[in-house]
């Protein structure tokens, strides 16, 4: 796992800039969305709307509920954020 303080700083910056973030979790899920809040050892995420998720839930919901994810559950090598000024995804560490 990447250093938690570095990850916390990165997530705080992404939250402040409303940057879209993507990463894989140790449980196999793939996250794509935004950072809602940052704590010392975890991050609150808002999942991006997805037509695939909507189909899987019978058209009831467009995205999973927001959730708190511990830094330890994030595969740091998969962490990336979208940089609109460069119009590309940037991987962690930058």
Image (tube, rainbow, N blue to C red):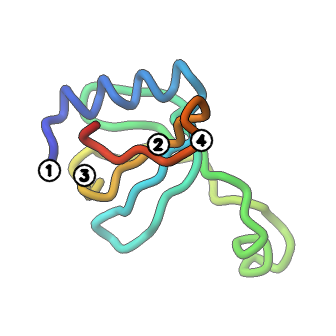
- Asked where in the image residue 2 lies, by quadrant, the reply is top left
Within the image, what quadrant is residue 53 found in?
bottom right
For the C terminus, the image quarter is top left
Q: Secondary structure at mark 2?
A: strand
Secondary element type, mark 1: loop
Where residue 87 is drawn, which disc sits there?
Answer: 4
Q: Nearer the viewer, mark 2 or mark 1?
A: 2
For marks 1 and 4 on the same chain, the one whose residue lies earlier in the sequence? 1
90 left or right of 77 in image? right
Foreground mark, 2 or 3, reads 2
Select label 2 or label 4 by which is in front: 4
Q: CA distance from mark 2 to mark 4?
A: 11 Å
Residue tagged by mark 3?
Answer: 76
Q: Is residue 24 above or below residue 88?
A: below
Q: CA distance from mark 3 to mark 1?
A: 6 Å
Residue 79 image offset from top left, x and y in percent: 35, 50
Mark 1 or mark 3, which is nearer the start of the sequence? 1
Q: Position of residue 13 (x, y in %)?
A: 43, 22
Looking at the image, is mark 2 or mark 3 earlier in the sequence?
Answer: 3
- Circles 4 and 3 in contact, beta carbons < 8 Å: no
Outermost residue toward the top in this view: 16
Provide the residue designation for mark 1.
1
SS of the residue under disc 3: strand
């Amino acid at each position: 796992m990447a250093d938690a303080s570095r990850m916390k700083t990165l997530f705080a910056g992404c939250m402040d800039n409303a940057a879209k973030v993507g990463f894989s979790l140790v449980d196999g899920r793939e996250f794509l969305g935004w950072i809602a809040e940052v704590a010392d050892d975890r991050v609150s995420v808002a999942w991006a709307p997805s037509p695939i998720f909507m189909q899987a839930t019978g058209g009831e919901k467009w995205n999973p509920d927001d959730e708190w994810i511990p830094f330890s559950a994030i595969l740091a090598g998969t962490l990336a954020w979208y940089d609109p000024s460069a119009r590309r995804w940037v991987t962690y560490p930058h």
